[in-house]
Image (cartoon, rainbow, N blue to C red):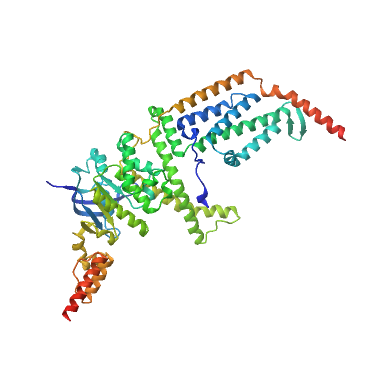
Amino acid sequence: MLKDITLGQYYRANSVIHSLDPRIKLVGSLVYMVSLFLFNNLISYTAAALFLFFIIGLSKVPLSFMLRGMKTVIFIMVFTVIYNVFMGTGTVIAEFWYFRITYEGILNAACMFVRLFLLIVGSSLLTLTTTPNQLTDGLESLFSPLKIFRVPVHEMAMMMSIALRFIPILMEETDKIMKAQIARGADLESKNIFVRVKGLLPILVPLFISAFRRAGDLALAMEARCYHGGKGRTRMRVMRLMIRDYISILILAAYLAGMILLGIRCKGFMEYLVPELQCAAHVVKNWVINLF
Amino acid sequence: MDNSIIQTNQISYDYVRTDENGEVESVHRALTAVDLKVSAGDFITILGHNGSGKSTLAKHLNALLVPTEGTVIVDGKDTADEEKILEIRQCAGMIFQNPDNQIIGTVVEEDVAFGPENMGVPPKEIAERVKESLITVGMADYAEASPNKLSGGQKQRVSIAGVLAMHPKCIIMDEPTAMLDPQGRKEVIRAARALNDVEKITIILITHYMEEAIYSDRIFVMDRGKIVMQGTPKEIFSRPEELKKYRMSLPQATEVAYRLKKEGIDLPDGILEKKELAKACVEYLAKKKQEV
C-alpha cells in the first residue's frame, strides 16, 4: 500500500511548458505568486486567472488531474473562508454570539479563496511539469551565486537528489518491516492510538538502522566513483536558455508589468462591490418579507 | 616489461576499534601479508568464505582502504599517495554487492554519468560515454528508466556501465551476484566476461559461487586474511580435499567427478564443466568396453 505513493506529481506530456528551462519555471512561479499579492480588485483577479489558465492550456495537463491535487489543501481553504466570513469588520448582515457576518467579510473570504486557489494551482503547475531532478538542477543553478558566501549549494542539491532516489526504496523497506513485525504479532491496526504509536517503534528502529547502513554503502560507492564534492565536477546535461525560454521571460515581464498597472489603476475590491452587495441584500430581504 | 596492473606487496590491514575516548579497544587483523599480482587483461577470481578478508582486499585495490603494512601499486601508482587517489579510482572501478546502494542517479543515464561528471569530463563526451557503456552492457533501452523499476541483474549491469563510463583499465567486483537471482547472476557474469573478452578490461571477481570461478584465468583462495591457494581453475579444482579444508564447495561437475573417483572410477583431474564431465565419462566407458 505504501508503494502507491508517488513523489512529486509529475505529469508526463510533451508541451512547451514541459520543455522550458526549470530555472525559468521556478522564477516564473515565484513571480506569479508574488503578483497575486500586488492587487485586490476583481479585474486583476480575472486577468491573473486567465493568464494561469492560458499557461495550463499550454502545458497540456488535464484540468481534472490538477484539481485532484487540490484535495489535500481543501481543508486549509475552507478554514480560511470560514475565518474570513465570521471575523470580518464592517457592514453587518447578521450577528450571533461572538460571530458577525459582514459584507466585507464575505468579500474578503471570496477574495482569499480565489487567491489561495490561484496560488496553489500556480505552484502545482511547476511540480506537474518539471521532474524532481530538473527541479533540483534548477535550484542548484539558481542558488549557485550563494557559493560565494560558502553556502554548500552543490551538497544540498546532491542530498536532495539522493533523498529522491532513496524514498521509494525506503518505502518498500518500511512495507517489508511492517509485514515482518505483523508476522511476529505486532498490533499496527489497533483502534487505540497509544497502542498504535507504540507499535511504530519496532518499525522505526530497524528502518533507521538499515538507512544508516545504506548511507554508508552509498558513500563508499560514491567515493569509489571519484566523487569529491562539487569542485571540478561537470554535468552531462548543461542547462542552456533557448529561444522559447527568452520568449517566456518576455511574456512573464509583460504579465508582471500589466498586473502592476492594473493594481494601480483599478479601484479596490471593497469600494467596487460593497454598494452592489448591500443593494442585493436589501432586495433579497424585501423579497423574503413579502413572501411571508 | 612487467605488465602487471595491480600488485600488492605483503599487505596487512587491521580493523581498529576505538572507544569514545579514542583509545584502542580491540584490533582485528583482516589481512595478513597478502601478495597479489594481476596482469593486465586477466580475469581473476578471488574465492573465500565469509570473513576471509576478500572484501577488505577488494577495498584496497582502489584505495578505499590503505594497508596498515605493505604497499598496493595500481597501474604504477601507490594507493597511499593521497594525490593519486582519483587517478587510481578512475583506473580501477568497483562494483559492490547491493545493487540498490550503489546507484546514485534517479534516472539510469544520470547514474552512468555520475563517474565521468566527477572526473570533470566535458558534457558532450559524457553523453557519448554514457551511450557507449549502456550499449556495452545491453541496457541502452533503459537509458531513461528509473533504477527502481529494474531487476537486480539489470541494476548491477547499470552499475557496471557506470564504472565503464569512467574508462577504467580494471574492474573489481565485490560479490556482485550475491543478492541476485540465478537469472540476474547469469546476466552479470556474462557482462563481466564480455568486458574481459572484448574490451580487454582486467576483471577481479570476488565471489563465493564456484561456478562463476571456472572461467577465470587465475583463482586465488583466501582464508583468514591470507591467500592460501592460487592457480588456474584446473589446478585449484584438482585439489578438492584442500578446498574442503577451507570450507569451500566445488563446482557441480567437479563434485560429481570427485565422488565418482572416490568410488574407483578413473576420471582425469580438474573437470570443471558438465560437458567435460560427460566426455570423460563416455571415454571411460569406451575404455572399459575395450578392456572387456
| Residue A269 position within the rendered picture, expressed as x and y whole percent measured from the top left | 67, 24
Task: Residue B119: name its quadrant.
Answer: top left
In this view, B24 is above or below A37:
below
- Judging depth in this view, the residue of B63 and B147 nearest the camera is B147
| Residue A236 position within the rendered picture, expressed as x and y whole percent measured from the top left | 36, 36
Residue A28 visible somewhere in the drawing: yes
**Total tally of numbered discs in the picture:** 0
Task: Residue B273: name its quadrant.
Answer: bottom left
Residue farthest toward the left in the current orientation of the protein: B1
Task: Residue A52: name its quadrant.
Answer: top right
Q: Quadrant of the C terminus of chain A?
A: top right
A285 left or right of B148 in image: right
| Residue B208 position within the rendered picture, expressed as x and y whole percent measured from the top left | 29, 59
Residue farthest toward the top in the current orientation of the protein: A265
- Judging depth in this view, the residue of A181 and A103 nearest the camera is A103
| Residue A163 position within the rendered picture, expressed as x and y whole percent measured from the top left | 44, 43
Q: Which residue is painted at 26% across and 40% down in the image?
A: B86
A268 left or right of A241 in image: right
In this view, A100 is above or below B144:
above
Q: Which residue is painted at 21% across and 75% down in the image?
A: B285
